[in-house]
Image (cartoon, rainbow, N blue to C red):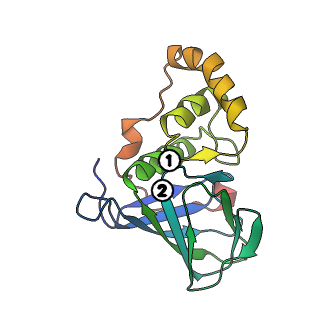
Amino acid sequence: MNIKVGQESINPVTGERAIVRVAPSQENEQLFVVDLFIRPGGRVTGEHFHPSLEEAFTVTKGKVGMKLGDKTFTAPLNERVVIPAGVVHDWWNAGDEEAHVKVEIKPGDRFYEMASNLFGFARDGKTNKKGLPNLLQLVLFGKEFEDVVVFTKPPRWVFNAMYILLSPLARALGYQGSYKKYLEPTRSSKFQSASEV
């Protein structure tokens, strides 16, 4: 995995632009830090939780709505909000200007792989308007990264049944859980507006 400080990644569907500030390594116990910029109307791919990692958000500009467990609130400016492993959460740009959030993830190596695939699917036009890939891709992606992210919809028992039924067909059609091409830094520096997507 070749993660560089300063590397930029764009998700034109969800409206996220991430710039790497600290790359995960053995020396920093896999800490991954990004500056995340979210355009108005932008949001994370879907409500989810992380089974084995902690995430922290510090909003430095803009208005970011958050759902954390059963609480919904506007993230306070310049205050660190910690999301422990296993806590369901969601977030979105709740304002009319670009928001800037410092995101810290630990451990972040597998998170980087997961997010790079989601951003890659979106850049290649292989997601729906919420940023999720088609069902055959989703079952393999979801199983590949179930240690990193679990979406709340569909419920996990439904997802597991879909995986059993659909994964042989998905593999036969050439789908994979993760793609090496998405793990390489992109050269795009243009952040598409909603009208360009």
Q: Nearer the viewer, residue 109 or 14?
A: 109
Residue 191 showing in the rendered view:
no
Against 130, residue 55 (above or below) is below
> What's the amino acid at mark 2?
Leu
Against 124, residue 194 (above or below) is below
Whether pointer 1 and pointer 2 mark residues with C-beta atoms closer than 8 Å, the reply is yes
Q: Residue 41, position in %: x, y?
A: 72, 65
For label 1, the residue is: 148
Image point (59%, 37%), residue name: 126
89 left or right, relative to 73: left
Mark linked to residue 106 = none
Q: Give the total number of marks visible in the rendering.
A: 2
Image point (67%, 31%), residue name: 159
Tag 1 secondary structure? loop
Residue 70 showing in the rendered view:
yes
Image point (29%, 47%), residue name: 1
